[in-house]
Amino acid sequence: MPTLFIHIVLLSIGRRLPDFGQIMENVAYHKYAVALYVIELLCQEQFLPLSKRQAQRFAGTTLYSNADMGPGEMRQFCDLDDTGRRLMKSAMSQMNLSARGFHRVLKVGRTIADLAGCEQIGPAHLAEALQYRARGQ
Protein backbone atom coordinates (compact mmCIF):
# COMPACT_ATOMS: atom_id res chain seq x y z
CA MET A 1 0.00 0.00 0.00
CA PRO A 2 2.91 2.47 0.10
CA THR A 3 2.46 3.23 -3.60
CA LEU A 4 -1.20 4.03 -2.99
CA PHE A 5 -0.21 6.40 -0.17
CA ILE A 6 2.35 8.12 -2.42
CA HIS A 7 -0.26 8.37 -5.16
CA ILE A 8 -2.77 10.03 -2.79
CA VAL A 9 -0.15 12.46 -1.47
CA LEU A 10 0.85 13.42 -5.00
CA LEU A 11 -2.78 13.96 -5.93
CA SER A 12 -3.41 16.17 -2.91
CA ILE A 13 -0.33 18.39 -3.23
CA GLY A 14 0.24 17.94 -6.92
CA ARG A 15 -2.50 20.24 -8.07
CA ARG A 16 -0.34 23.12 -6.87
CA LEU A 17 2.80 21.95 -8.69
CA PRO A 18 3.47 23.16 -12.24
CA ASP A 19 4.89 19.79 -13.41
CA PHE A 20 2.14 17.68 -11.84
CA GLY A 21 1.45 15.83 -15.11
CA GLN A 22 5.10 14.87 -15.51
CA ILE A 23 5.30 13.65 -11.90
CA MET A 24 2.22 11.48 -12.38
CA GLU A 25 3.64 10.02 -15.61
CA ASN A 26 6.85 9.09 -13.75
CA VAL A 27 4.86 7.45 -10.92
CA ALA A 28 2.77 5.53 -13.45
CA TYR A 29 5.91 4.41 -15.30
CA HIS A 30 7.58 3.15 -12.12
CA LYS A 31 4.43 1.31 -11.02
CA TYR A 32 4.33 -0.35 -14.43
CA ALA A 33 8.02 -1.32 -14.22
CA VAL A 34 7.59 -2.79 -10.72
CA ALA A 35 4.50 -4.71 -11.82
CA LEU A 36 6.38 -6.17 -14.80
CA TYR A 37 9.25 -7.22 -12.53
CA VAL A 38 6.86 -8.95 -10.11
CA ILE A 39 5.11 -10.71 -12.99
CA GLU A 40 8.48 -11.85 -14.35
CA LEU A 41 9.47 -13.31 -10.97
CA LEU A 42 6.13 -15.10 -10.63
CA CYS A 43 6.44 -16.50 -14.14
CA GLN A 44 9.95 -17.79 -13.48
CA GLU A 45 8.78 -19.39 -10.24
CA GLN A 46 5.86 -21.16 -11.93
CA PHE A 47 7.08 -21.85 -15.43
CA LEU A 48 10.65 -22.99 -14.90
CA PRO A 49 9.49 -26.15 -13.09
CA LEU A 50 6.88 -26.62 -15.82
CA SER A 51 9.44 -26.49 -18.61
CA LYS A 52 11.75 -28.85 -16.69
CA ARG A 53 8.88 -31.31 -16.19
CA GLN A 54 8.02 -31.22 -19.90
CA ALA A 55 11.67 -31.55 -20.90
CA GLN A 56 11.94 -34.70 -18.76
CA ARG A 57 8.71 -36.10 -20.20
CA PHE A 58 9.75 -35.51 -23.80
CA ALA A 59 13.42 -36.49 -23.44
CA GLY A 60 14.42 -38.63 -26.39
CA THR A 61 11.64 -37.26 -28.62
CA THR A 62 11.42 -34.34 -30.99
CA LEU A 63 8.75 -32.73 -28.80
CA TYR A 64 9.36 -29.60 -26.76
CA SER A 65 6.05 -28.91 -25.03
CA ASN A 66 2.57 -30.32 -24.50
CA ALA A 67 1.32 -28.27 -27.45
CA ASP A 68 3.59 -30.28 -29.77
CA MET A 69 1.95 -33.62 -28.95
CA GLY A 70 0.12 -35.52 -31.65
CA PRO A 71 -2.54 -38.21 -31.08
CA GLY A 72 0.07 -40.94 -30.52
CA GLU A 73 1.96 -38.98 -27.88
CA MET A 74 -1.31 -37.97 -26.26
CA ARG A 75 -2.25 -41.63 -25.77
CA GLN A 76 1.15 -42.11 -24.14
CA PHE A 77 1.34 -38.98 -21.95
CA CYS A 78 -2.31 -38.02 -21.30
CA ASP A 79 -3.75 -41.08 -19.60
CA LEU A 80 -7.10 -40.42 -17.92
CA ASP A 81 -8.78 -42.22 -15.04
CA ASP A 82 -12.42 -43.39 -15.26
CA THR A 83 -13.79 -40.11 -13.90
CA GLY A 84 -11.77 -38.12 -16.42
CA ARG A 85 -12.96 -40.33 -19.27
CA ARG A 86 -16.60 -39.89 -18.22
CA LEU A 87 -16.12 -36.13 -17.92
CA MET A 88 -14.59 -35.87 -21.39
CA LYS A 89 -17.27 -38.12 -22.90
CA SER A 90 -19.94 -35.90 -21.36
CA ALA A 91 -18.16 -32.74 -22.54
CA MET A 92 -17.88 -34.09 -26.08
CA SER A 93 -21.62 -34.61 -26.31
CA GLN A 94 -22.71 -31.46 -24.43
CA MET A 95 -20.19 -29.07 -26.00
CA ASN A 96 -20.14 -30.78 -29.40
CA LEU A 97 -16.36 -31.20 -29.25
CA SER A 98 -14.69 -32.48 -32.37
CA ALA A 99 -11.72 -34.85 -32.14
CA ARG A 100 -9.46 -31.83 -32.59
CA GLY A 101 -11.26 -29.98 -29.79
CA PHE A 102 -10.99 -33.06 -27.57
CA HIS A 103 -7.23 -33.17 -28.14
CA ARG A 104 -6.86 -29.46 -27.46
CA VAL A 105 -8.67 -29.83 -24.11
CA LEU A 106 -6.42 -32.77 -23.22
CA LYS A 107 -3.28 -30.75 -24.01
CA VAL A 108 -4.45 -27.84 -21.89
CA GLY A 109 -5.45 -30.26 -19.11
CA ARG A 110 -1.97 -31.82 -19.27
CA THR A 111 -0.41 -28.36 -18.88
CA ILE A 112 -2.70 -27.49 -15.96
CA ALA A 113 -1.76 -30.78 -14.28
CA ASP A 114 1.91 -29.96 -14.86
CA LEU A 115 1.47 -26.54 -13.26
CA ALA A 116 -0.16 -28.25 -10.28
CA GLY A 117 2.76 -30.70 -10.07
CA CYS A 118 0.60 -33.75 -10.83
CA GLU A 119 1.69 -36.68 -12.97
CA GLN A 120 -1.90 -37.75 -13.71
CA ILE A 121 -4.46 -35.49 -15.38
CA GLY A 122 -7.33 -35.26 -12.92
CA PRO A 123 -10.98 -34.32 -13.43
CA ALA A 124 -10.32 -30.89 -11.88
CA HIS A 125 -7.61 -30.21 -14.49
CA LEU A 126 -9.94 -31.25 -17.31
CA ALA A 127 -12.81 -29.17 -15.91
CA GLU A 128 -10.55 -26.11 -15.80
CA ALA A 129 -9.38 -26.75 -19.37
CA LEU A 130 -13.00 -27.05 -20.51
CA GLN A 131 -13.83 -23.72 -18.87
CA TYR A 132 -11.21 -22.00 -21.03
CA ARG A 133 -12.96 -23.12 -24.21
CA ALA A 134 -15.34 -20.62 -25.69
CA ARG A 135 -18.82 -21.96 -26.39
CA GLY A 136 -19.21 -23.38 -29.87
CA GLN A 137 -15.48 -23.92 -30.49
Image (tube, rainbow, N blue to C red):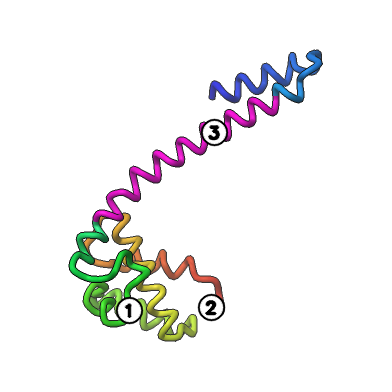
Q: Marks 1 and 3, how far apart in space?
A: 39 Å
- Type of the residue with mark 1: Gly
- In the image, 137: left or right of 47? right
Q: Position of residue 13 (x, y in %)?
A: 74, 14
- Type of the residue with mark 3: Ala
Disc ID at residue 33: 3
Residue drawn 26% across the image and 61% down it: 54
Residue drawn 64% across the image and 30% down it: 28
- Type of the residue with mark 2: Gln
Q: Earlier in the sequence, mark 3 or mark 2?
A: 3
Residue nearer the viewer, 42 or 131: 42
Residue nearer the viewer, 22 or 80: 22
Q: Position of residue 39 (x, y in %)?
A: 46, 41
Residue 43, quarter of picture: top left
Q: Secondary structure at mark 2?
A: loop
Asked if 78 appears above or below 37 in the picture, the reply is below
Q: Which residue is mark 2?
A: 137
Q: Which residue is mark 1?
A: 70
Q: Marks 1 and 2, how far apart in space?
A: 19 Å
Q: Secondary structure at mark 3?
A: helix
Residue 52, quarter of picture: bottom left
Residue drawn 32% across the image and 79% down it: 70
Q: Earlier in the sequence, mark 1 or mark 3?
A: 3
